[in-house]
Amino acid sequence: MPRLDTLGLPSLTPSVLASFAAHGILSVEDFLVSENTLKLDETRSEAQRQAILDLVDYLEQQSWGFRTTWRMRQELKARGQQYLPTGCESLDKLLEGGLREGTVTELVGGSSSGKTQVCMQVAANVSCGCRAMVGYVDTCHSFSATRLSHMLGGLVGGRDASQRRAGAADEIGEAMKSVLHYSIFDIFAMLSLLNQIHINLCAQVQVGEQPKTLRLLIVDCASSVIAPILGGTQGHALMVSMGIILKKLALENHLAVLITNHTVGGEGGQPKPALGETWKAIPNVRLHFVRDWDSNLCHVSVMKHATMSCNRQTAFRITRTGLKPAF
Amino acid sequence: MDVVTLALPPSLRSKLLATGFCTTTALVSVAPFQLAREASITLEEALAVLSLVPRTCSDHTGGPVAGSTTAWDLLMKNERGRIETGSVEVDKILGGGILSKELTEICGVPGVGKTQLSMQLAVNVQIPVKFGGVGGHAIYIDTEGSFMMERVLQITEAVIDSLRIKSPGFSAAPLTAEDFLSHMYLLRVHDPLEQLAAVNNLPTLLDQHKEVKLIVFDSITFNFRQDFENMRERTRLLASMAQKLMAVAEIYDVAIVLVNQVTHKVTSEGFRTVPALGESWSHVCTNRLMVYWMDGQRYAHLAKSPSLPVGTAPYVITEEGVRDAHESHKRIKLDDAQVRSSRSLG
């Protein structure tokens, strides 16, 4: 919430501001939580009353106002494609199309259960198939450009370079140029990056032929920047801030956000998602990964979903050229 | 965006909050001197605060945020040197050896060769570029007191001998054991606090020794295994240590090898051997190499890697160091039956 003096309202003269400040009202937030601001009685001067009315007007303009569900539906329709296919058939089937734009999807699983492989597969598929830009925020050094190029190779066809059709190499190169990789190792850098992306996307002006747009943001792994600060003095607040900005990026910038989370030992030694109950509210979709080492299959189950029933399962196999459905 | 999310010292943060600067939008349009006056902080502090505030970029293309590298550029400069383990088979499952900028964890039971493998790597990293090596220095952080000078000398001499045989140009550039040993910096730490200090101190150390290409922690576990009163505190300390190590690996382009111990996890079917330090630690390392005994043979198993498939390779430890497994080297060990009976007795 901005400070009152930055609003630029003409009725907020220095003397009015000073009188507000005397009551500890400096920002819009202070104004809203203050108990008797809206009282327009005789104790206030004409200028003060005018300022309060202007402020209320200003706040009304700022709010989004009501939208009908029908209107929302029309807007979504006009926007076109809502699902970004993951490039893994079994996952697309499980999610009925793929990652939904405007939502946060979380992959939960133990170490080497296949989360990063899914992240890279989705990055490959969206950069190549959807011709969109992908932001890949890497917090644990797990991104491998070589691996991504193998997956892209699998997507454009052919088992190796010699079998690929002409132009495939260019296609791979083009796709790889639209995957943006960020190495981030602490929560403050993470928050500032996410905010900067949000600000840049909001400032985006549609002019003429648009270059590729950012449609997918991957954070692998989200929990590893949060884990070190949890339990500290402001760890919880920072975790919530990160959740909020991820949701903002999804909703306001219409991105599909994909994050990963690790597991910790829960009751009775059963693994459960890390980061606890508060974080649970952040992702719209939560998928749980378990790798079966005997069959080398990755089993995926739906833990939480906004529009579909839970506990449905599927499995995939990790191969050199990407993730293939298990037969 | 809340002011809380900016990396500021607590005193500065509370001053900002008390004067109504709760969000960064409030800070965008304020001048440094004005901020300094209103929040009663120094001008330097005000400038520092304002430099952290994200701003709308001027060109309005709304494109990517600075600081990114495209996957294409990463692929093109992927020519990073790999540090060989001494065994061709093990190198094969690692895709050629240990890679810089990555954290590689080696875990296994005592006596399977974790320390031997780490010492071998600390020697091999120094093989000069013209002999096909990386030509870097090594930092060896010893927490268990298991580093043996005599053994390193033995390994070094074996490496020099093999270079002499393999490389015709050797006589032009003779290498001595002294060269190798004087570029291996040893650090002995005794308790968790010293270990955390050592990790914090790494950037300073690396600024002074820019040739360092490998940092070995043997072991990362030891100091953190003794009964920590508060296990949550332990998890947090480990996680923040891991984060710092990752940043160091990335910024200074070094390979980091972390030796980890194993522990028994009791399950409904009995117990199985798992790496120590718990599940959240498993996420820290980029690669995980499990070393274990099977039928009197040492094996290395790549259990986790973002870019390589799972793989297993046998190896041996000879007088010269880590080498490929051949039949003649197979060590006679108790058979499985004996091991099992002794276990049931225990």
Image (cartoon, helix red, strand yellow):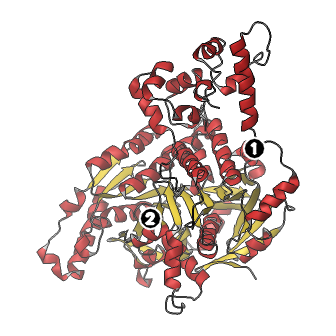
* Labels 2 & 1 near each other (Cβ < 8 A): no
Q: Which mark is residue B38?
A: none
Q: Chain of mark 2?
A: B
C-alpha distance separating marks 2 and 1: 42 Å
Are discs 2 and 1 located on one and the same chain? Answer: no
Q: Residue at x 77, y 15 (%)?
A: A36
Position of B160 relative to A306 (above/below):
below
| Residue A82 sits in quarter | bottom right
Residue farthest to the left? B172
Q: Residue at x 50, y 25 (%)?
A: B12
| Residue A241 sits in quarter | top right
According to the picture, the residue beneath numbered tag 1 turns out to be A277
Q: Under tag 2, what secondary structure?
A: loop
Q: Chain of mark 1?
A: A
Report whether residue B246 is seen.
yes
Q: Under tag 1, what secondary structure?
A: helix
According to the picture, the residue beneath numbered tag 2 turns out to be B113
Amino acid at pointer 2 = Gly
Position of A109 relative to A265 (above/below):
below
In this view, the residue in front, A322 or B318, is A322
Report whether residue B190 is seen.
no
Label 2 CA crowd tier, 10 Å (few <14, some 14–19, many 20+): many
